[in-house]
Amino acid sequence: MTDFMVALNLPLDAKYTGQLLSENPILAIEYFINLSKPTMVWVLVYIFYHYSEEKGQREIEQLKLRTSIKESEAKVLKAQMNPHFMFNALNSIRALVYEDPNKAQQGITQLSNILRSSLIADRRTTISLKEELRTIEDYLALEKVRYEERLQSKWDIDDNTLGIQVPPMMLQTLVENAIKHGVQKAIGWGFIEINTSIIEDKLHIKIRNTGQLHGTNSDSESGGFGLKNTAQRLDILYGTDASFKIYQEDNLTVCAEIVIPTENIDQKNSNISLDSSNMRAAS
């Protein structure tokens, strides 16, 4: 374009520049440089614009790819959890088939309720805390058939937390681990306590149980699997906005604590309480 402009302008300006060019030929180069400046500015603007546009498009594609990967990872982790839970639930019922058929039938009914919740949960990334707690109620009722008076439960649920969205089957897995590594190994009896509250616009969930923390360190045990799965799912869904920790509260008590953002609230369920008869210590 600069060559074209020089070729066009030099003949037009010949009567003014002809004598100067003959006396000082280097003016032709200066003529070329002067006409190239606006062209170069235009070229740079053009390149910068398209570079920015392509960079933005690449960032969008990378974001979509990362989101797709996280969704796939979340589905894989959730899919890993369900067979593991089913295995332990069926073992609980199997122990009662010959010993007490009536209780076994009751256990099958409770398991069907849990399976119904599990099938619904498979289609969703998160569910309301109320739905998750109902699944835990059925699970504890099923385990109560097996452990009877050895299993004591206590609920301390803030009604304002019931509509907050949580990953499905996550709390149930922690309760399952608490029973296997706490109540099952306890001498005499053991307890599980579930507490929910809202602190600084975040959902705080505590699951306390009888037990020793070192019992869940092995990756080969369900405790190690469940704890790693919980931490990974929270990281995928919430990143640094969520946290999970488990610690030995005292010599006989382990506490698992989860913190989740509260921005996703199901207003329709937020004012509905669970059956108060279930929210008390089991006798």
Image (cartoon, grey):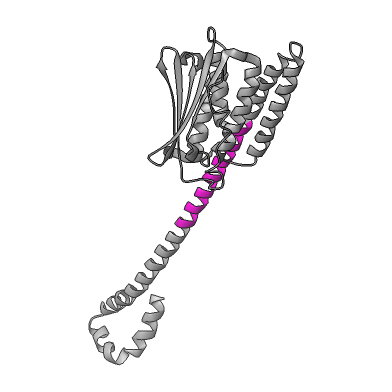
Left-right relation of 152 to 263 = right
Q: Could you tell me residue 80's position as x and y percent?
A: 62, 29
Residue 218 visible in the displayed image: no
Residue at (46% x, 61% y) in the render: 53
- If the image is split into quadrants, where does the N terminus sit? bottom left
Majority secondary structure in the magenta region: helix
Splitting the image into 4 quarters, where does residue 38 fall? bottom left
Left-right relation of 213 to 69 = left
Q: Is residue 177 above or below residue 188?
A: below
In this view of the protein, which residue sits in the foreground, 64 or 150?
Answer: 150
Q: Is residue 220 above or below residue 137?
A: above
- If the image is split into quadrants, where does the C terminus sit? top right
Q: In the rendered structure, does residue 173 fall within the stretch colored magenta?
A: no
Q: In the rendered structure, does residue 67 fall within the stretch colored magenta?
A: yes
Q: Please count the marks in the image.
A: 0
Residue at (65% x, 41% y) in the render: 123
Residue at (60% x, 37% y) in the render: 75
Residue at (51% x, 41% y) in the render: 164
Name the outermost residue toward the top.
187
In this view of the protein, which residue sits in the foreground, 218 or 131?
Answer: 131
Name the outermost residue toward the bottom.
15
Q: Could you tell me residue 228's position as x and y percent?
A: 51, 26
Name the outermost residue toward the front.
277
Q: Could you tell me residue 117's position as x and y percent?
A: 65, 35
Q: Is residue 247 above or below residue 8?
A: above
Residue 177 visible in the displayed image: yes
Q: Is residue 96 above or below residue 84?
A: above
Left-right relation of 2 to 97 = left
In this view of the protein, which residue sits in the foreground, 23 or 123?
Answer: 123
Splitting the image into 4 quarters, where does residue 128 fall? top right
Task: State which region is magenta.
Answer: 56-79
Q: Could you tell me residue 51's position as x and y percent?
A: 43, 60
